[in-house]
Amino acid sequence: MAPATYSRTQIILHWLIAALVAFQIIFHEGIAAIWRDRMRGIVPNEPSLNPHAIVGLLILALVLWRLTLRLRRGTPALPENEHPALKFVASATHWLFYLLLIGMPISGAVAWFFGLPQPAQAHSLAEKLLIPLIILHILAALAQHYYFKTNVLKRMLGRT
């Protein structure tokens, strides 16, 4: 049976991960510039301590924690009267988030720490998928709240 609400930990993890992902997107140019210089041979192809890499590994740990909570505790059910196609999109979107937010730190870490271009390309492709997915997620949450008049957004704000 699905829980009626998200746990406080699930809510905190959601917003903490969202903030860290926003940080990564906004401030990614520093590591991208170093990476380009490494690949061009301008600087040695050796990893350096970098906030982007550290935050990426933190995101990985937090996402794995959140996924563990999801699998153990569950999540609130989607609105009963929701169209099955919207339920499918919501579910697929969440699982794609998990895939990207686990795969990106792993591919980024492998690229960064081993100086390999192929995982960096996978990381870059995942970024191009993640940003539109975030926009879709935000628009869907707003549509649930303002158009469909459900409590979906309120649940993640801790206000059921």
Image: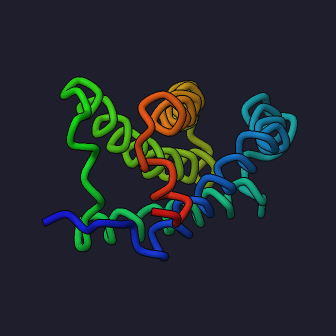
Outermost residue toward the left in this view: 1
Q: Tell me if residue 59 can be seen.
A: yes
Identify which residue, 38 or 105, lies in the foreground: 105
Identify which residue, 107 or 127, lies in the foreground: 127
Q: Quadrant of residue 89?
A: top left
Q: Tell me if residue 126 can be seen.
A: no
Q: Work out which quarter of the rendered image holds the C terminus and state it.
A: bottom left
Q: Where is residue 50 in the image (x, y as percent from the top left)?
A: 78, 58
| Apparent side of residue 2 relative to residue 32 in the rendered image (left or right) | left
Q: Work out which quarter of the rendered image holds the N terminus and state it.
A: bottom left
Identify which residue, 49 or 77, lies in the foreground: 77
Q: Is residue 81 above or below residue 132?
A: below
Q: In this view, does 50 lie above or below 95?
A: below
Tell me the residue at 19%/63% (across/down): 2
Q: Where is residue 51 in the image (x, y as percent from the top left)?
A: 77, 60
| Apparent side of residue 136 relative to residue 45 in the rendered image (left or right) | left
Tell me the residue at 52%/60% (across/down): 14
